[in-house]
Amino acid sequence: MSSAAMHELAMRHRLQWWEALPWAAGLAAFFLFPNYLAFGTQVLVTILFALSLDLVLGYAGIVTLGHAAFFGAGAYAVGMLAAHAGWNEPLSGLVAAALVAGLLGLVSGWILLRTHGLTLLMLTLCTMALLEQAANMFSGWTGGFDGMPGLSFTPILGLFEFDVLYFRTQYLYALAALLLGFAVVRVLVYSPFGRSLTGIRENLLRMHAVGAPVRARQVLVYAISAALAGVAGAVFVQATGYVNLAVLGLERAAGVLIILILGGYGRLYGAFVGALVYMLLEHTLSKAYPTAWQLGLGLTLMLVALFARNGIFGLGDALRRRWSAR
Amino acid sequence: MNTKTTLTLAFTAASLIAAGAQAQTVKIGVVLPYTGVGAEFGQQVDRGIQMFLKLNPTAFGGHKVELVKRDSKNPSGAEAKTAVQELIAQDKVDLLTGFIYSPDAIASAPLVSAAKKPMVVMNAGTAWITNLSPMISRVSFSMWHSGHAMGEAAAKLLKAKTAVVGYSDFPPGKDSLDAFMRGFEAHGGKVVDAIPMGGPGQVPDFTPFFQRAKDRKPDVFFVFVPAGDHAVSVVKTYAALGMRQAGIKLIGPGDITQDFKLQAMGDDAVGLITMHHYNADLDNAANRRLVAAWRQEYGANAVPDFMGVQGYDGMAAIAHAVTALKGSMDPDKVQAALKGWKYADSPRGPISIDPATRDIVMNEYLSELVKKDGRLYQKNIGVITAVKDMCKELKQGKCAN
Amino acid sequence: MDLASILLGGLAAGMVLFVVSVGLSVTMGLMGFVNLAHGGFAMLGGYAVVLAMRHWGLPFSAALAFGFAAIAALSVLLERTLYARLYRASELDQVLFTIGLVFVMIASVTLAVGPESQRVELPAWLDGQTDLGFLRYRSYSLALIAAGTLLMLALWLGFERTRTGAKIRAAVDNRRMAESLGVDVGRLFTLTFALGSGLAAVGGGLGAEILGLDPQYPLRYLAYFLIVVAVGGLGRVTGVFCAALLIGVLDFTLKIYFPKGGTMFIYMLTLGFLLARPQGLFGKRGT
C-alpha cells in the first residue's frame, strides 16, 4: 500500500498516533509484570466486555443491567461444548460463542427494545436472571453453582498451549481478541451505521421523522454487542478453564456498567480506562486492606461521579478545556 | 502500606532445640472471603487460625510462619484463582490454605497441581474436591460426613420411619439430600418428599416449603440450609407453624445450629437435633481451652464454631508438616506427612486424614438442643466415630472419578 | 395448604417489600433520580433499630421510630450536601454515585459492627401465633399486614388529601409546570427523600425477620425493589402497594407448588407483565 493510500485510510477512520499506545502498553505489561498475567487476563476480558456494553450504552443509548446474559451465554457455550461435545478447539469455540450470544441478543433485543427507561432496565435484568435460574435448574448440563471445572482446550493454532500457572498464552490470546473486538467496534462506530446510532441516541424523534429504521438499527447493534460480549465470556472460560453461575450474575453485569461509567461511555477508550482503574484499585486495595477496601473504592466512585461529567474521560475533557482556556 | 500480614512466632528460649534450629520462614497463603457475603465465615476461620497460633506457640518447632492473606471476595472462584496465581507466582508461598466456598477450591485446583503446591482446605464441602488434585487435602468436612451419619442415626437412634428433606438448591444442599437419603434408606427409612427451598443467596421465606413438609406428616424433617441466617429463619418458621406439636422432629447437619448464631435462635430451637463434627459445647479438654481463650480474645459473647475449629485444625496439620520436614517444604513430602496424620488434641475430638482420599476422618456427634442455665446448649446424645466421606467410599456420582 | 394461609403469608412478605420500596418509587418518580443506595438506607435503619434495642434497651416500636428519625435525618444531610449536586447529572452518573455510596455504607457497617448478620429481637406480643377465629396464624405476619395497610392508607391520604401531597403529585406529573406555579420543588425533594428513606429504614427493621439483616442487604435485594417499582409504576403509591402484594403472594404461592423453579416464575411473570404494560400498573404511558 502506498503511503498516500495509507494516509488516506488513517484519515478516513481518524486513526491517531496515540491510539497505538494502549496496545503497546498491553504488550509492555506482558514483559514487565510476568507474575501478574492472570490478573492481566481478567482485565483484558473485562475491557472487551465493557467495550461491547459501550456499543449499546454509549453509542445507541440503551441502558442495560443484563449484559452479563450474553457474557454468560458465550461462556457456557464454550464450556458445554468442551465438556459435553468434546469440542475444545479455542478459535472455533469463539465463533460458536459469538453466534450463540449474538442470536440471543437478536431475539431478546427484538422483544425487549420496544421499551425504554426503567422498564427496559428491569426487563434486561429479568432476562439475565432467568438465564441464571435456568443454568441452575439444568445443573446436569451446566454444573450449577459449583460449575464445570477442569475444562481443557487444545493449543491455539496448534502451537500455543494454554499456560495453567503463568497465563502467558492466555494473556496474549485475550489481547488479540480485544484487538479484534476493538477493531470491529471502531469501524462500526465511524461508519454511517454508527452515525445513525448516534442520531438515534441524541434525537429519537428526529430519526423517526427522517424515516430511519430505528428499531432495526437498535436490534442490530444490540445483537452485535451481544456477540462481542459472548466472545469476552468465551475467552474468560478458555483462559481459566472453569465456568460457573457467576458469569451470569448481577454482580458481573452491574460491575461492567460501573466500570464503563467510571471510564466514560461513548468514548471508545472509556472501557479501557475504566476497567484498568477500577480493577487495579480494587486489586491493590484489597491486598493492602482485605476487609476495608470497599470503602476506598466506594469513595472513589462517589468522587468521580460528583466532580466529573462522564467519568474519567469526562474529567480529562474538563481539564483539557480549562487548560486551553487559559 | 502493608501488603502482607506477618505473624512472627516467639521463640521459647529454654525449651527449644539449642543447636542448629535452622529456623526457615514458611510462607502460607491464606485465601478467605474477608469481604462480601462470606465475610463472617472468613472471620471465623481467620480467628481459628489465630487461636491455634496463640495457644500453640511451639507447634511450628521454632520455624517462623508468615501468613499472606488474600480476599477471595465472592463465591465465584475467579477472584480466588487470581489470588492463588499471584500467591504462587509472585509471593512464592510454600502452601495454600483457607477456601470457604467450593467454587474457590475448585477453581484453584489446576493451579496447585501445575505448580505442585500443597493446599489444605479449611471449609469447602463439595465431596469430590479432594479428587481434583493430589495436592489437595481437607481438614473440614464434606456434606456426606454429616448427612450420611444423620440418616443412619435418624433410623437407628431416633427410630424414624419416614422423612421429608428440605434443602437449599445448590450442590451442598443436593449433596446433603443424597447423603441423608443414602444413610436413612440403608437403615430402613423412607424419604417421602424432597423440597428444594430456594437458592443460597437470599434468605427466602421458608413458610411455604415448611407447610408442604408439614402436610406430608413425616417422623422427621431433615433440613439443610447454608450456615448463617437461613438457619435462624428455619427455626423460627418451624416454631411458627407449630410443627413440633404436630409430632415432626426437626433434624439436620450442624450447619443449621452454627454456634455463633445459636443463642439468637431463642426458645423455639429447643428440641432441635443435629449431627455435626463440632459444636462449642463439646466436652473435651482441648475444646474447653479453646472456648475459654476465644471468649477472652474476642469478647464474652464470641464463640468458636465448626469453621473456627477447621481453621484451628488446619493450622495444626500444617504445623505437623512443618515440624516433620524441619521447615523445608518439599511438596511431595508435605503431602506424605499430611496423609495419615492423626491429631488427638483437636477441639472436635480425634481426627485424622485418610491417606487414600486425603480427606478428613472424624467423629460425628448427635446433639439435642436443650435449655440450661438460661442459654441454649447442645446436649450430646450419641456419636458415630471415625466417619469417612461416604460419597467417595461408596463412589457416588462425581465422587467415583 | 389452605387458601387463607397462603394469602396471609404472601401478603406479609409483600408488605415488607412495599414498606421498603415505596420510598424508592416516589423519589424516582418525583426526582427522576436513580437512587440505588435506597436499600442501603433500609439496611442502616435495620442496624439503627438493632443497636438502639441492644445498647439503649429501647422497646421494638420505639426503636423503629428512632430508626425512622435517624435515617431520615441522615438522608437529609446526604441529600443537601451530595445528592443535590447530581440532580442535573445524567442518570448514569447518578448510578455511579449511588453505587459508590452503597459500597461505602456496606464497608462502614462491616467495619463498625462486623460482617455477621444481626437479629432483631421481636417483642413478646409479636411472637408466636394469633387466633383469628377461623385460623391460627403467625402474629408477626399479621402485624406486618396491618402495619403495611395502615401505612398505605396514611400515604394515600397524605398524597390525595393534603396540599403538600397535591404539590408532590403535581411535581411528579410535570415538574416545570409545578415550578412555574410557585411550588418549591427543591424543598419537596428533600421532604420526600427524607420520608422515603425513613420508610425504608422502618422496612429494614420491621422486615429483618423475613429478609434478614447484614452488610450485604442493600445489593442482595436491590433487584427486587427495582422490580416492585417498575411493575408498580413510578411515583404511584397505590401502584407500589399492589405490585408488592402481587409479587409477594405470587412468589409465596409458587414456592409451595413449584419449589424447584420458584424464583424463575417471578422473573418470567415480571417479564411478561412489563412487556404487555411497560408503564407498570398505574404509571403513565410514555414514562
Image (spheres, coloured by chain):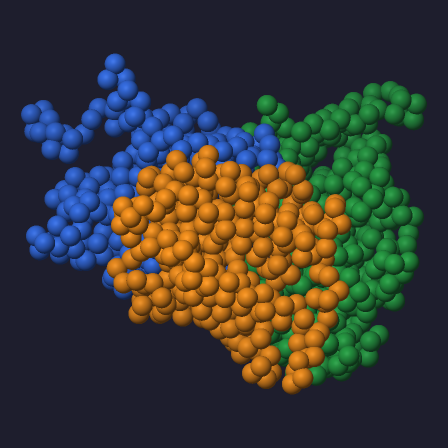
B339 shown above or below B9: below
Q: Quadrant of residue B322?
A: top right
Chain letter tied to green = B
Who's the residue at 21% across and 54% down the image? A218
Could you say which quadrant of the image residue A13 lies in?
top left
**Chain C: what color?**
orange
Nearer to me, C126 or C7: C126
In the rendered image, which quarter contains the C terminus of chain A? top left
Q: How many marks?
A: 0
Residue A139 seen anywhere in this rendered image of the structure: no
Q: Relative to residue C241, is residue A172 depicted above or below?
A: above
Question: Residue A195: horizontal and vertical position, in percent?
Answer: 15, 43
Q: Please report the residue visible at 55 percent of the width from the left and 77 percent of the height from the top.
A: C7
| Residue B275 % position (x, y) | 78, 64
Tell me: residue A130, above or below residue A165: below
User: In the image shown, does B286 or C131 lie closer to the viewer?
Assistant: C131
Q: Residue at image x 71%, y 41%?
A: B46
Colour chain A is painted in: blue
Q: Quadrant of residue B141?
A: bottom right
Q: Is residue C172 left or right of residue B245?
A: left
Q: Is residue A59 left or right of residue C167?
A: left
| Drawn side of residue A20 relative to residue B50, left or right | left
Q: Is residue A209 visible?
A: yes
Residue B193 spot, x, y in % from top left: 63, 79
Q: Quadrant of the N terminus of chain A?
A: top left
- The residue most toward the top is A326
| Residue at the image point whose x is 70% and y is 83% from the top | B217
Residue B153 x %, y %: 80, 72
Pick whichever, B231 or C129, lies toward us: C129
